[in-house]
Image (cartoon, rainbow, N blue to C red):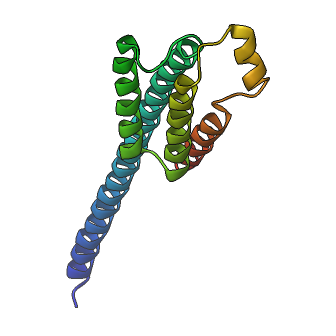
């Protein structure tokens, strides 16, 4: 073969390999960045949802001290709480969902008790955190998701 043909083929092959390498590197970097952005938005969305849930159940727990479910004013809040549990069911892990459902059940049970003073409520709950299991499940899920970034 002629040296000029070999040189021309080498140049074409070198340019092709260099172009494909650049394309593949850019493609993989863009794919990783897009995946990372989607995961970061998902984590932020879950944090906002869990925050909203905790705020709603906190208000309901406090309200359950001296009210019952028969009062219509809290029925809308209970529906909102179950709506948030439904949203949690759509996007969360099984551990988070199970603990959120338990929190919702605890709230309904607390409304079934007769009205009580805040001191009686404190004695009933003691120093325990009614959301401890839920917040631990949320933290574990978050750490798992951030580990995939």
Most extreme residue toward the bottom is 1
User: With respect to residue 24, does 10 lie above or below?
Assistant: below
Query: Closer to the camera, 131 or 26?
Result: 131
Quadrant showing the N terminus? bottom left
Question: Residue 55: in sight, yes or no?
Answer: yes
Question: Residue 33: in sight, yes or no?
Answer: no
- Residue 11 image point, x, y percent: 27, 69
Residue 124 falls in image quadrant: top right
Q: Identify which residue is drawn at 79% across, 23% down.
A: 127
Q: Identify which residue is drawn at 57% across, 26% down.
A: 110
Query: Closer to the camera, 20 or 124?
Result: 124
Query: Closer to the camera, 50 or 125?
Result: 125
Count the numbered circles shown.
Answer: 0
User: With respect to residue 28, does 125 lie above or below?
Assistant: above
Q: Identify which residue is drawn at 38% across, 32% down.
A: 82
- Residue 72 image point, x, y percent: 35, 14
- Image side of residue 57 versus residue 35, left or right: right
Q: Identify which residue is drawn at 56% across, 45% down.
A: 141
- Residue 87 image point, x, y percent: 36, 37
User: With respect to residue 13, does 81 lie above or below?
Assistant: above
User: With respect to residue 25, does 98 lie above or below?
Assistant: above
- Image side of residue 73 versus residue 101, left or right: left
- Residue 81 image point, x, y percent: 41, 27
- Image side of residue 118 versus residue 6, left or right: right
Residue 38 falls in image quadrant: top left
């Amino acid at each position: 073969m002629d040296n000029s043909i070999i040189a021309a083929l080498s140049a074409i092959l070198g340019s092709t390999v260099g172009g494909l390498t650049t394309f593949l590197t850019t493609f993989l970097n863009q794919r990783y960045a897009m995946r990372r952005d989607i995961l970061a938005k998902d984590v932020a969305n879950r944090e906002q949802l869990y925050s909203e849930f905790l705020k709603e159940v906190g208000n309901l727990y406090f309200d359950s001290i001296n009210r019952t479910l028969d009062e219509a004013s809290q029925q809308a809040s209970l529906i909102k709480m179950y709506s948030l549990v439904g949203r949690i069911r759509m996007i969360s892990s099984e551990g988070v969902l199970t603990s959120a459902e338990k929190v919702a059940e605890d709230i309904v049970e607390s409304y079934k008790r007769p009205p009580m003073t805040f001191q009686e409520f404190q004695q009933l709950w003691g120093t325990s955190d009614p959301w401890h299991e839920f917040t631990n499940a949320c933290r574990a899920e978050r750490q798992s998701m951030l580990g995939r970034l």
